[in-house]
Image (cartoon, rainbow, N blue to C red):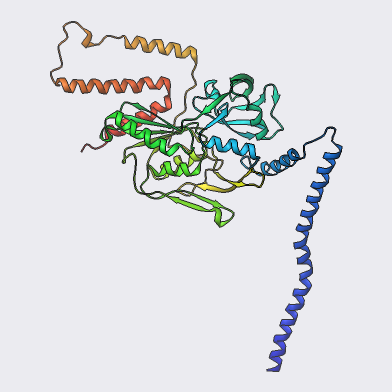
Amino acid sequence: MRKLVMAALGGTLAGALVASQMAGPLMAQEAAPESNLFEQLDLFGDIFERIRGQYVEEVDSKKLIEAAINGMLTSLDPHSSYLNAEDAADMNTQTRGEFGGLGIEVTQEEGFVKVISPMDGTPAAKAGILAGDFITHVDGESVQGITLDEAVDKMRGEVGTDIVITVVREDVAEPFDVTLTRETIKITAVRSRVVGNVAVLRITTFSDQTYSGLEAELAKSVEEIGGMDKVTGFVIDLRNNPGGLLKQSILVSDAFLDKGEIVSTRGREAADSTRENATPGDLAMGKPMVVLINGGSASASEIVAGALQDHRRAIVVGTKSFGKGSVQTLVPLKDGGQMRLTTARYYTPSGRSIQSLGVMPDIVVNQPAVDPAVEGVEAQAAAEADQQRTEADLRGAISNDSMSEDEIKLLEEERARTEEAAKLRDEDYQLAYAVDILRGLNAVAPQE
């Protein structure tokens, strides 16, 4: 027994000895990062003081610190940044749906400003700025080498003043200048129109007005068509919608889903991981739906498109979306500013992350580029076709005896709706395609 005890004690002592021998290096390894951290902070302080004391011109210490903080955040990814008190107030104004500027959502890529999407009815949209355009100069000054916030500041200015931006566009050989006049941008979150018996709901942004606007515009469209029983279907147009408030995208998705997951977020910490589920109720009452997206559809738009696609609630039509699948958390700071920090990725109900990949449409439909010369020829041909005579135009043509006057009237109304949809192709090919899908689904649906 004594030998056994001694053996046990020997093992314990040996373990203690090994532990004590290893403790020194381990503690040194743990201390090394802390030591390096303090050395690097000391280096930062040294550089800061040298800039303040020796730079050729006097510098603003506050601006230096802000630039350093912003540089640290923007080095992480394109969406993390520092907002001083003024910038934070501007951003809060934007989420309420009214602000001044050109009306473009931008990011930074390869040192230049890249357009995510122009906003409907804004100076940028009116001037023909497109998703995917690169802005290389503002009023002749290059934006390469400056932060995204600095580039945005250059594009801001007094309402009514002009600005010249230099644009590089794919498939256009040379950069070109565009002159825009700054305006107070008032974004209407949701607009609607009726095409035949199809209700088209155009969602331009996800501000705090979006869900309430969706409810109101949907109800207005249904009333215009003559009731839900006469509605063929709904088109949710998310093209060039750069996103916005996550909560609003969840509400919009939930508006058309009865159950199931809408979106989940997964971050480094458990607290940054969430799951949002749909609640009973469908504003569209089960009617067929088409969602339109393109390369300017980002973030919250992709949440809605991905959720409705995964649940097979809607057919997604258009081109691949932007691919912003990350979540930014706004952290209030002592100076009244905010830190925008990427804290999670979001996933569609099927578990796919669309970060850098985007949502792929079920049916890819490109928007044809308009060639004015060709457009003129086509318009003339269409006008000539409209002038063609039919049997009914001939003098003395006999009447159709297989239909009553009421039936003929209904047929003429249906023809008018079909012709309206056909004319839409010249205005907006992708939207016309979406309307045709809904008409086709309605044509083959079983009659009750």
The x, y position of residue 286, in whole percent, is 31, 41
> Residue 358: image x %, image y %?
52, 39
Question: Quadrant location of the N terminus?
Answer: bottom right
* Of residues 151 and 388, the one drawn nearer to the viewer in this rendering: 151
The answer to whether residue 143 is visible is yes
Identify whether 165 is placed above or below 149. above
In the rendered image, the quadrant that contains the C terminus is top left
Image-quadrant location for residue 183: top right
Q: Is residue 110 something that shows in the picture?
A: no
260 versus 221 height, above or below: below
Q: Position of residue 4 (x, y in %)?
A: 69, 90
Q: Nearer the viewer, residue 363 or 89?
A: 89
Q: Residue furthest bottom?
A: 1
Residue located 52% across and 35% down the image: 242
> Looking at this rendering, what residue extends furthest in the left direction?
401
Instruction: Please tell me how many numbered marks the rendered image carries.
Output: 0
Residue shown at the point (47%, 26%) measured from the top left: 367
User: In the rendering, at what x and y percent does residue 338 appear?
Assistant: 63, 44
Q: Nearer the viewer, residue 434 or 79?
A: 79
Q: Residue at x 54, y 52 (%)?
A: 266
* Residue 217 shown left or right of residue 445 in the figure: right
